[in-house]
Image (cartoon, coloured by chain):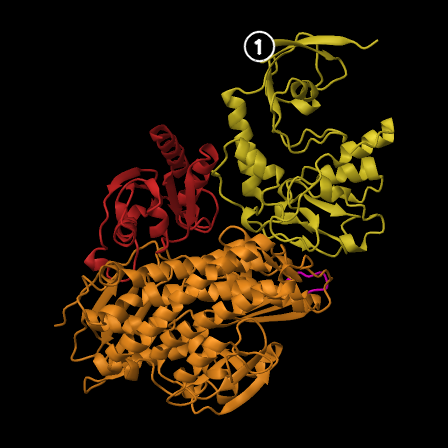
Amino acid sequence: MRAGLLVIGFGNPLRSDDGLGWRAAERLAETQPDTAVVTTHQLVPELAETLSECERAVFIDAADPAASGAEPGTVLVQDLVPRSPEPSAFSHHLDPAGLLAMAQTLYGYAPKAQLITVVGASFDFGEQLSPSVQAALEAIVRQINADE
Amino acid sequence: MSQRIVIDPVTRIEGHAKITLHLDDDGQVADARFHVTEFRGFEKFCEGRLFWEMPSITARICGICPVSHLMASAKAGDTILGVRIPTAAEKLRRLMNWGQIVQSHALSFFHLSGPDLVLGMESDPMQRNLAGLIALNPEFARDGIRLRQFGQDVIRLLGGKSIHPAWCVPGGVREPLSVEKRDEMLRRLPEAFEIIERALKLYKNEVVAKHRREYDVYGNFPSLFIGLVSNQGGLEHYDGLLRVMDSDGTILEPGLAPKRFREVIAEAVEPWTYLKMPYYKPYGYEGHAGLYRVGPLARVNLCDFAGTPKAEAELRLFRSNGRVVRQGFAYHYARLIEILFALEKIEETLNAPDVTNKHVRSQAEVNHLHGVGVSEAPRGTLFHEYWVDEAGLLQSVNLIIATGQNNLAMNRTVLQIARAYVAGQKLHEGLLNRLEHGIRLFDPCLSCSTHAAGQMPLTVELHGPDGELLDGLQRG
Amino acid sequence: METVVTLTLNGEMVSARADQTLLDVIREQKIDLPTLCHMQGLSERGGCRLCVVEVQGAPRPMAACVTPVTEGMVVRTHTPELEHQRRLVVELLLAERNHVCAVCVVNGHCDLQWAAAKLGVASVRYEYLHPDLTMDASHARFVLDHNRCILCTRCVRVCDEVEGAHTWDIAGRGIKTRVITDLSRPWGDSPSCTSCGKCVQVCPTGALFEKGATVAEMTKERDFVGWIIRGRTKREWTW
């Protein structure tokens, strides 16, 4: 039998807003004890197996404002489909869609999945989120709880 | 006019690697340098803190391999206290260290190097990635996942959570091992053995045959090797004596007490990289005479024997063409042998009757003002050296990390590959991949905040004899 | 006979003894009000300002721990302004010194961390001062880390009022204020310290801890002073 919701928060919790994924995942673990939660510095191959054991997965990550071109605190939600890594990212970089593809190929099943990214303001050493990212965290947690 | 290709690296990653290749007037590669443009102030900001805090502080140097820092830091703390830790505590620390060797080597072999090894260095880059690997050989990819999980589970069962910040403390460890957890680890072992035996078969039957030229070119040069061996001269990862050997097999230093490491290791700095350049002191830095290698290849070369039946048999095969293997490509084989060894040692240790003893922590005050902790991280020998005052406050901290020690050797490897594969004034994707694989042989850990598995943002620049940029390639 | 007063607390009529503080009454009514410098059994200081409440007719918020109840008082404890002010206090405390939970001995067992969590402080709007502060590890059993001290003075009060040694005190003013032992000599050299460890138990953060403790390993007995006082005054030793 598969578990329900799996939340994977990734990033570096000692790098200010890069800890968003961890903080959100930890908060969800408190508010929804049934939710399976993984916090990790990076996406690693063995998560493919964990993914193949849940009904629905949510990845939570922080994004670089320069790369995304959006204001800090902006929340981007994408529905994910299993997809092999882009040829341009041909180093051995794992992304959520790639992990889903691994789950599909290796274990014959990939769950319905979403990637939620929040544009960060600061990635300096620190354990605190910026106010705009903190506000976004609250919104994400409310949204995921509402979806359940 | 040279064409310049730029692929922006992921900006969030702090550590950043760059390779510059310099051509001479004849268009041959004259010099190659591997630069690391990352700065870390860890040694500085630990000053004034208590040495008891160091395992948890230094474990955060790296989110990927904190266990190695836990070991070296706690061991440095043991020497400041001047205690011999309880037998069970030493067994538990060793178990965690072997768990770390298994999981780290599994990632390196199966998932980071796997695509190159199984699909080929210059195969279609569209396919030469994890997905391509999975499509071609799903069992291999699943094996890598299971083996890594086993290593991670050993660490988790001992330390609680996947990586507890301070399970390992000066004087021992914080928690004894329960019978239930021991049995859980034992139950998982047979599968891990099956996986490593499949991987060894694949390496010996297919990988080597497919990479004859790479085997001859990649990191194939004489060098010194430094690492720990057990007091009896066996393969060792946690404690023991420092041994130095050259690639003819001459033993320059049979077994130095680790606290005397400064007699054999000194550090140089270069303006173009933040990574310090340790070298073998008696040979000097001049002309890189003191270049040495650490890590799996060094350890497997240095030891007189493995000491466990299966790893011992592999070690004999490893040495079938000579006592010392100098080809950098053999790092892969050495990793597999070490996984096998670690699994055998885990099994042996879990079956020892005292492994579940409750007494796992010695209490003592500060008895020595200087402490050195040395252990073997997956990537090589790790040194933590602390100076404290009578109260235990740190006056000075020096860390010598494995990747730093392989720095000169990585430069030499890059140069060798560039000489063999650079043609004309242009770079191409296959070359970039070869250079990256050359560095990956050492499984370097460059930054503490990289974000994605195995991702190393890498820039390669090709310079002409007058220093002009002829070509550049970048990957994120 | 005790004088009884009646007051309005968050819209409810409640009665109290005239010698009680507002904080006593609020806690009796099971209203959750955060505090840091208050500790049952010690004198009140009114320093942390987390227990501020709105008293009708008063020109500014009042610290409940040092405000006596009076007849007809109308008090509110959780208005948005008060919540805002409490968060601000915690943020300022976090910005003032170097509070790094990840490597702290009381991570997970810390009053400041709990207060921040309870008030929903997840980010600090002020620039961190990152002061260069020392640790005093000269005592054989205990350590003082100024980086984590919030100047609540619980250590000063417990040492003076319960142990009777008065080893601890406060030196300096404003941002330079520090807790000191015996006219600012190293703790280990203090002739007055009895090494009883009460200061360590009452310290709300990781500023005072047992030597040799590692991350998240130090827990504190929060009812420590209560036990002693009950034993001393009522001859009751049911811990």
Residue type at mark 1: give it. Gly
Q: Nearer the viewer, residue C51 or C133?
A: C51
Residues drawn in magenta: B389-394
From the image, give the main secondary structure of the stretch colored magenta. Answer: loop
Chain letter, colour orange = B
Q: Is residue C126 above or below residue B266?
A: above
In the image, taking residue B49 as reference, residue B153 lies left or right, namely left
Quarter of the picture holding the N terminus of chain B: bottom left
Q: How many marks?
A: 1
Query: Whole-percent x and y of residue B204?
Result: 32, 77
Q: Could you tell me which secondary element the residue under label 1 belongs to?
A: loop
Q: Which chain is red?
A: A
**Residue lying furthest left:** B1
Chain C: colour as depicted: yellow
Task: Give the percent coordinates (x, y) of residue B404.
Answer: 44, 72
Q: Residue tagged by mark 1?
A: C11
Residue placed most toward the observer, B392 or B413: B413
Q: Which residue is at a point 57% across and 46% down the rendered structure image?
A: C99
Residue C72 falls inside the magenta stretch: no
